[in-house]
Image (cartoon, rainbow, N blue to C red):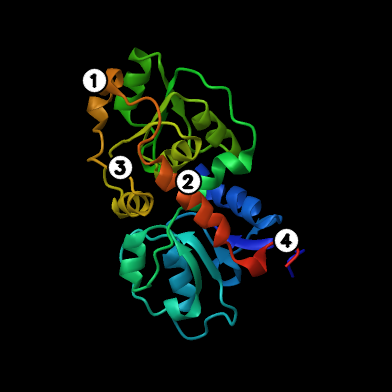
Amino acid sequence: MADAPLKLYWWDAKPNFGDELSRVVTGFASGREVVHAPPRKAEIFSVGSVLQFAKRAWGKEGRPAHRPAIWGTGMMTALKTDFVAYMDIHMLRGPITASLLGVKTESYGDPGLLTAEALGPRPDRHDQIGLVLHHSQLGDARIAALLKDEPRVTYIDVQGSAEEVCRAIGACAHVISSSLHGLIVADSYGIPNTWLDPMAHARLKYYDYAAGVGRVLPLPLAHENIAAALPKLATGELPYASGLAAAKDRLIQNFPSHLRAGA
């Protein structure tokens, strides 16, 4: 029933704003209250590299009877495609995910791009450089030294709530991030941003997202080179702004109509 809370799966094993962001943007697009659900009971999968959780539930005998909606979701690595026939795929994060799944679509976009629209009034801008680390890199000694020596760099903790972290990102002059959704939220607000080395973390999802919005993604910035890069950070309009605008439109247009409020 469309007036009941919408059951959404997002990864919640550790506090991480990028995963909780799924609740925010899915609620915005659907016009409904959103609640966390385990994969087998989820009506929809959206933000995150969480297709492996859908595969675990629908890729074998005893799968749930309902067909969950896939809206802008991606993957970390290639998966067996035995679950795809049991999904209603409305949109995928990018063309790499589509290719690996064998899905014929050209409708791509990460729902995190709707952050600015979902959270309403834009934060007041300042001239700080926001630094957003993937949760696997928290506590890096090089970052502690950087923050001590570079007062213009402000650390944004991904363990905060989605609303707090996104508004902090939205107030920055530039964002350096090893978190994919640090980059995506900056893109949502039109803030120039730089990809920081995710180190041991899989890179597929970054390239998948970037290809879906027409973003050129150079090799990531090494942690030890952050200080030297600060004077050369980009400013002004994003060169791929039209790709972002098109992806935002696609996300709204392709949200599952049967899951919208009043459906």
Q: Quadrant of the N terminus?
A: bottom right
Residue 65 image point, x, y percent? 59, 82
> Nearer the N terminus, badge 4 or badge 2?
2
> Nearer the N terminus, badge 1 or badge 3?
3
Disc 3 from disc 4: Cα separation: 38 Å
Check disc 4 and report the residue beneath it. Answer: 261
User: Is residue 12 in sight in this rendering?
Assistant: no
- Which-is-in-front pick, marks 3 and 4? 4
Q: Which of the numbered marks, if any, corresponds to residue 228?
A: 1
Near mark 2 (Cα within 10 A), the count class, few <14, some 14-19 or many ≥20, is some
Residue 178, quarter of picture: top left
Near mark 1 (Cα within 10 A), the count class, few <14, some 14-19 or many ≥20, is few
Residue 240 image point, x, y percent? 37, 41
- Which-is-in-front pick, marks 4 and 2? 2
Q: Disc 4 residue type? A: Ala
Q: Residue drawn 26% across and 30% down? A: 223
> Nearer the N terminus, badge 1 or badge 4?
1
Residue 148, quarter of picture: top left
Q: Which of the numbered marks, if any, corresponds to residue 198?
A: 3
